[in-house]
Image: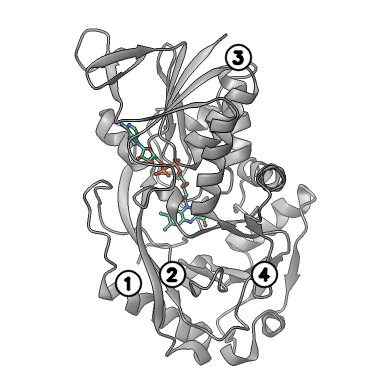
Amino acid sequence: MKSVIVVGAGIWGSSLALRLAETGWRVTLVEQHRPGHVRQASAGETRLLRCSHGADEWYARLARQARDGWRRLEERAGEELYLESGMVWFARTPDGWEHASAQVLKNLDIACEVLDPADGARFFPDSGGFRHDDLSFLLWEPHAGVLRARRATQVTAALARAAGVRLVRARAVPVAAAGGAGPYLSAVEIDGETHRADRVVWACGAWLPELFDGLPITVTRQDTLHFAVPSAWSVPETPAWVDHGASAYGHGDVDGVGMKATSDAEGTPYEPEYGPRVVEAASVEQARSYLGRRFPGLAQAPVLFSQVCQYALTPDAEWLFAELSPGVWLLGGDSGHGFKHAPALAGYVTGVLDGEHGPEPRFGLHERVPARGLRTSGHTG
Ligand SMILES: Cc1cc2nc3c(=O)[nH]c(=O)nc-3n(C[C@H](O)[C@H](O)[C@H](O)COP(=O)(O)OP(=O)(O)OC[C@H]3O[C@@H](n4cnc5c(N)ncnc54)[C@H](O)[C@@H]3O)c2cc1C
């Protein structure tokens, strides 16, 4: 039986462990805390699922596949993890990112509709007073929605254990052949003891750059805000929304934690293990100011819930999936847009580890040219 050690039980590592166990691998999943612990990126209360990715088709296809994957997972788990509220994209120019997205969605036969900005009023409760005078059109993606992220991570890890994955709670350390900085062995060190396997996958999110030198990944702090709003503003009745040009996004209330309205612009450099987890006043002001401009009726909504999380950003927002040494794989650099894809990504990575296909060159360790097209953040200011 082929053996694999997956390090990191965020949504990427847990989904991969589950898929590998189901396809005949003997899997050990190593996690330094617990699946769903609050420091991991996958422990956000919610994450959006959208197929729009600007001009890119690859991620759009994977997202569509992932939606089916989430549905299957829900069936197995017997609980609702994906709330299909739909998503409204606020397009500021007629020929920008949303226009490119609409073209791709149409080409791939993924449902979408281009609407007049005034049509937005039908999606949002009257109490908001939807303002659209800065918008050129709306792109409506009816099958987009909101994932209960932290819960989905815990459920995925639990299903992985039920499928035979051995979950070890420990901090794993890479093992270099010559005791230096590589080449690395397909082994991990835990409490001074070396554990070997046919493959090792380091799915360590924002911790990856601390484990391996020279990776094209920057870790940034991201403050997330939820506001107390009238009950009409709930998912799935209220859709998710993204203003790519303003780097702002949100969705209606899920499970009583309030309406999410937050900035997607990258924050300051951050250390995921010890960085403070208290949101900054400036982030609250920024989120409230966008909320008030777009939905004037919600301008005074108090903050109900907040989280500090982190992005593991590559310069071009393409993920990192590369074989560092024989049998040693790095899987990271999710760039703030990897949660939704997890079930489908796990299938793709399994195919590579099984030798069915090679990894896309786009995921390699080459020098990356800065680009923002894959993120929901069109600007940094
Ligand atoms: C604010 C915010 C909003 C986002 N919004 C969206 C969205 O709307 N849609 C979307 O698709 N994506 C979104 N994302 C991105 C998404 O959350 C990530 O792509 C996804 O969670 C990445 O999962 P991961 O498993 O790679 O990393 P993590 O969830 O961070 O997991 C990594 C795990 O590795 C463990 N680990 C690290 N080092 C070691 C070690 N040496 N030994 C043992 N364990 C170790 C850590 O403890 C951690 O549990 C968002 C991210 C943030 C921060």
Q: Which residue is mark 1?
A: 283
Residue at image x 27%, y 8%?
A: 177
Q: CA distance from mark 2 to mark 4?
A: 19 Å
Q: CA distance from mark 3 to mark 1?
A: 45 Å
| Sequence-first disc among 4 and 3 | 4
Camera-side residue of 75 and 258 = 75
Q: Amino acid at mark 1?
A: Ser
Q: Which residue is mark 3?
A: 355
Residue 275 visible in the snapshot:
yes
Marks 1 and 2 in Cβ contact (< 8 Å): yes
Query: With respect to residue 84, does 246 lie above or below?
Result: below
Q: How many marks?
A: 4
Query: With respect to residue 124, does 97 lie above or below?
Result: above
Q: Which residue is mark 2?
A: 262
Closer to the observer: label 4 or label 3? Answer: 4
| Sequence-first disc among 2 and 4 | 4
Q: CA distance from mark 1 to mark 2?
A: 8 Å
Q: CA distance from mark 4 to mark 3?
A: 40 Å
Are there few (<14), some (14-19), or many (20+) residues within 10 Å of tag 1? some
Residue at image x 61%, y 76%?
A: 234
Residue 148 coordinates in the image, percent (x, y): 56, 57
Q: Which residue is mark 4?
A: 236
